[in-house]
Image (cartoon, grey):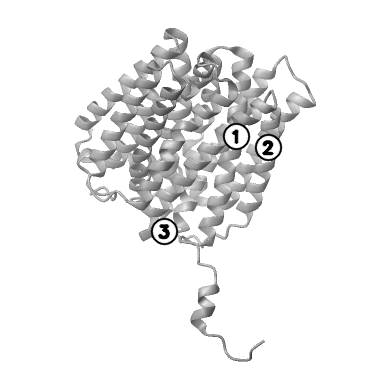
Amino acid sequence: MSGAAEDPAARRRRLPEPAPFGDAWVRYQAARLLFIVASQVQGIAVAWQVFEDTHQPLGLGFVGLAQFLPMFALSLVTGKVADTLDRRKILLVCHAIVALAAAIFLLSNTVLHLSHGRMTLTYGVLAMLGTARAFGGPAGQSLSATLVPKEQLAKAIAWSSSAWQLAMIAGPMVGGLLVSVGRGPNLAYGTALLALLVSIALMAGVRTPPRAAEPTKERGIGTLFAGIRYVAHNKVVLGAISLDLFAVLLGGATALLPFFAGELDVGPWGYGVLRSAPSVGAAICAALVGRFPIVTGAGRKMFACVFLFGLATIAFGASRWFFVSLVALFVTGAADMISVVVRQTLVQMSTPDAMRGRVSAVNQVFIGASNELGEFESGVTAAWLGPRIATMVGGVGTCVVVAVWVLLFPKLYRADKLDGT
């Protein structure tokens, strides 16, 4: 070995490049990615099991309702908890609850061999999952925003959304494949449980920055309603999250995909592919936004994409061909991603850290209402009208909502940049 001093520049060239947003952010995103994949695998298994047990649209609708009710009931408390307690520890507890749910589903099918009362147990465990999501959502959104410098927040949100969509692609496809290969949900439940345990280990290693105490005039129960008041008075934020609420509430067809998979004769694996298609479109769109951020015309672009979401939903409801259905779902995901990036950036950049949890909790109620409550709405309308007509009517409703929201929230429509200006 030579005794000559090594050139510092050569040494630096051999060192690994630092993570673009910091090691803590990367570790957090890895834990989050694995958690979402496992949750989606578990969700696919649950939905297919409920479909096989009931063959009723309303049965699938109750899957969403069971998860939404605790999220709605606890929204005020969970936001305050996220602003008061260690957000990383909150997430660790929530991940552990989701892992426990996977273990319960697996044991009920393998060790206990439940038949009578299995639907009651299923909906009860789903309510437990909804409770975990109620606490984990505000904590996760608030923690993520503290792990990167403010000037990198918009780009970090875009890349985080892209990673989330990649997980949403992989999760349903893996879940559908495992249900198909395992000829039932048990293999999917076991795989989800193992992945969730790894995500817990990753989350435990995240090092969070110290929380800066910020003064607030709110005291007592008033602090619980601070997030609601903030959203109500900020018309741009209110318009953005309510547009997403009603657009997805009416236009979402996720809960009915098992029925479409059955009509298209593609089985559980095809169901997983259909479930992944919106996320494929969203992931590609998120990657493009991360590479080419929205600089101007944010409001107009968001409204145009939500309108496109409604049109694609109509096309999906009318389709009788698997490929056309995939393309329509792909477009819904790509169009919806613009709304996600605009909405999340507006909310995070304009909210002080001391109340991010409470504002995130309000945002989560809107998102949960559009997704889980939207699944219940889809199940009810499908029971009345049939899955296809219900989906097309929902798509038309989304287009109508866009037109109405342009009139109700002109400032949002005219928003030029993602800081709401």
Q: Position of residue 323 (x, y in %)?
A: 44, 24
How far apart are the alpha carbons under marks 2 and 3? 43 Å
Question: If the image is split into quadrants, where does the N terminus sit?
Answer: bottom right
- Front position in the image: 293 or 261: 261
Quick one: label 1, few (<14), some, or many (20+) residues within 10 Å?
A: many
Secondary-structure class at tag 1? helix
Secondary-structure class at tag 2? helix
Q: Amino acid at mark 1?
A: Val
Q: Position of residue 40 (x, y in %)?
A: 57, 34
Q: Amino acid at mark 2?
A: Thr
Q: Nearer the viewer, mark 3 or mark 1?
A: 1
- Front position in the image: 8 or 348: 8
Q: Position of residue 14 (x, y in %)?
A: 54, 73
Quick one: label 2, few (<14), some, or many (20+) residues within 10 Å?
A: some
Q: Residue at x 37, y 31 (%)?
A: 331
Q: Which label's residue is closer to the chain start, 2 or 3?
A: 2
Q: Nearer the viewer, mark 1 or mark 2?
A: 1
Q: Which residue is mark 2?
A: 191
Q: Are marks 1 and 2 in contact (CB under 8 Å)?
A: yes
Q: Which residue is mark 3?
A: 214
Q: Please state if 363 lies on the left or on the right of 171 as rendered.
A: left
Q: Which residue is mark 1?
A: 174
